[in-house]
Image: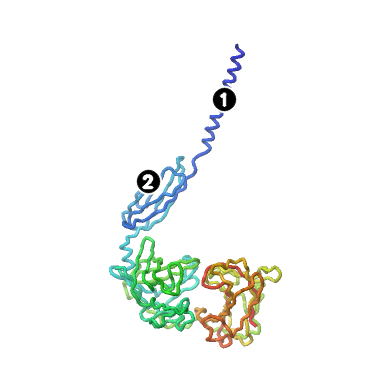
């Protein structure tokens, strides 16, 4: 009997030990799986009927409690609070999210609360407010993005395009928008290329308002339209065919060479002493336009418009080369066409929408090194600024070898276009207003092809039909353009043996 009790007693205590072990392990596993760390996040919407009221939507994860600090001394522990600020201003709202283990995460956003009436008064005054282009420093320009605005081109009050500086743009509190051209209009090249008014100030009459495609664009002249203004998003929308601010061709999402029914853009207004400044911007893919307008409460502060352009640059010494070429095999493989003059600098830096590298391996795998042309933006030419005005006595043709890869995506705006450009840049601030261009389209892919052009037979450019290289003594600028202009689609190409013969 004693032995039997000992046997069953031993089994009983062994079973208790096993159960205890299981329980212990189970508890230990629970302790090793704490709740996931919280992630704090929120978005907000400002009421359209009460600009002080903001609805916050909580997008936090792994959280069980929330704490809001609205930056105005008020707080909340609601998950999705609706908060009424007491005054317009800029506030940093902080959300702290905690999980069941009291671990926390924070997220903050700065929001601007604007009184729509006071914001509208900044734009349109008590009854109306008239704006003009700012006449100090640069007033408009284009670049790849807001951080590099006006990098590629800008306009100043130097006598260039003076008609823009006289034009007036008036916003009225009744919602009307009035444009006054003051009798003059500028022939934007993007709109009027190839016409008699291209790149000039001309009389603002309907008969002159015919674009490069032969369409009537007179709706851009003086007129009354409508506008709406959303100060919460800094957005102005002009409604009415032909209403514009900035440049006529700039639209909400793209450029157009004909008047549109409406367009929207961003506008930020700053109050200054004696005047207000308004910065207007249009953002496209890899392209950012902005403009600075001014409205004076003290007219004495307004500078005069300079209407006569002072001489630009300098006349370079003449050179009549017997040879002029660059193979791009090495940094020194050239005659006259010095790579030190390659824009954007030494043939290696990226700027203005392209990058160029000298001395890369032949993509065909059989020849000497060449130049690699990476097209990255709208302004994409490989540019040569010469140290001399080139005399073309010894040349009748220009040629370049191009390797066009089939691996590029040509289904969008990237083309198989090839262009050689000749112009004057040392005394002309905008070389593209008078250059000659020689164009071709690649039909053979993944192979080297030599494209040769007759210097006396340009195929495009504002100088076509006006002059040939041999008739000018001041030409000092050359460029190669691959993939087509006016777009930001990327592509990689290869060139060698850029040569005048």
Task: Using the image, determine if residue 296 lies above or below residue 66.
Answer: below
Q: Closest to the observer: 454 or 389?
A: 454
Residue located at (35% from left, 80% from top): 182
On residue 78, which mark appears? Answer: 2
Q: Does residue 426 appear anywhere in the picture?
A: no
* Quadrant assignment for the C terminus: bottom right
Residue 246, quarter of the rendered image: bottom left
Q: Closest to the observer: 90 or 283?
A: 283
Residue 233, quarter of the rendered image: bottom left
Separation of marks 1 and 2 at Cα, in angstroms? 48 Å
Residue 14: x and y in percent read 58, 23
Q: Does residue 467 appear anywhere in the picture?
A: yes
Q: Residue lying furthest left in this view?
A: 127
Q: What residue is disc 1 on?
A: 17
Q: Residues within 10 Å of mark 1 (few under 14, many from 20)?
A: few
Q: Give the number of callouts.
A: 2
Task: Using the image, determine if residue 14 lies above or below residue 500.
Answer: above
Residue 84: x and y in percent read 32, 52
* Quadrant assignment for the N terminus: top right
Q: Is residue 94 left or right of residue 334?
A: left
Mark 1: secondary structure: helix
């Amino acid at each position: 009997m004693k032995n039997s009790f000992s046997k069953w007693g031993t089994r009983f205590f062994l079973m208790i030990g096993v159960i205890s072990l299981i329980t212990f392990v189970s508890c230990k596993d629970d302790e090793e799986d704490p709740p996931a760390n919280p992630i704090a996040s929120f978005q907000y919407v400002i009421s359209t009927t009460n600009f002080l009221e903001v609805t916050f939507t909580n997008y936090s994860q792994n959280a069980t409690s929330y704490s809001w600090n609205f930056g105005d001394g008020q707080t909340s522990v609601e998950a999705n609070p609706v908060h009424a600020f007491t005054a317009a201003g800029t506030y940093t709202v902080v959300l702290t999210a905690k999980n069941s283990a009291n671990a926390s995460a924070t997220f903050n956003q700065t929001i601007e609360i604007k009184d729509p009436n006071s914001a509208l008064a900044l734009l349109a005054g008590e009854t109306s407010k008239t704006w003009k282009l700012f006449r100090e420093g640069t007033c408009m320009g284009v670049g790849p993005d807001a951080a590099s605005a006006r990098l590629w081109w800008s306009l100043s009050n130097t006598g260039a395009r003076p008609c823009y500086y006289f034009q007036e743009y008036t916003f009225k509190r009744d919602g009307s928008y009035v444009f006054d051209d003051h009798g003059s209009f500028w022939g934007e090249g993007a709109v009027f290329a190839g016409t008699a008014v291209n790149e000039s100030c001309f009389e603002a009459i309907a008969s002159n308002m015919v674009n490069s495609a032969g369409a009537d664009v007179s709706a851009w002249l003086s007129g009354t339209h409508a506008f709406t203004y959303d100060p919460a998003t800094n957005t102005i929308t002009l409604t009415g065919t032909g209403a514009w601010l900035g440049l006529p061709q700039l639209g909400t999402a793209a450029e157009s060479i004909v008047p549109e029914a409406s367009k929207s853009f961003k506008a930020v207004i700053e109050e200054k002493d004696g005047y207000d400044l308004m910065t207007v911007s249009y953002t496209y893919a890899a392209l950012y336009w902005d403009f600075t307008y001014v409205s004076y409460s003290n007219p004495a502060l307004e500078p005069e418009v300079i209407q006569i352009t002072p001489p630009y640059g300098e006349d370079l010494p003449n050179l009549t080369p017997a040879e002029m070429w660059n193979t791009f095999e090495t940094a020194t493989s050239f005659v006259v066409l010095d790579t030190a003059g390659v824009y954007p600098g030494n043939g290696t830096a990226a700027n203005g929408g392209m990058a160029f590298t000298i001395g890369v391996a032949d993509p065909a795998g059989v020849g000497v090194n060449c130049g690699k042309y990476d097209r990255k933006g709208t302004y994409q030419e490989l540019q040569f600024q010469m140290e001399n005005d080139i005399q073309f006595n010894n040349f009748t043709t220009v040629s370049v070898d191009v390797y066009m890869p089939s691996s590029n995506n040509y289904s969008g705006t990237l083309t198989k276009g090839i262009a050689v450009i000749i112009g004057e840049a040392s005394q002309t601030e905008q070389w593209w207003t008078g250059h000659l261009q020689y164009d071709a389209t690649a039909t053979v892919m993944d192979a080297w092809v030599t494209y040769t052009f007759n210097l006396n037979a340009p195929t495009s450019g504002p100088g076509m039909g006006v002059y040939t290289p041999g008739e000018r003594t001041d030409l000092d600028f050359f460029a190669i353009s691959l993939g087509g202009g006016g777009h930001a689609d990327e592509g990689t190409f290869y060139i060698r043996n850029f040569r005048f013969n």
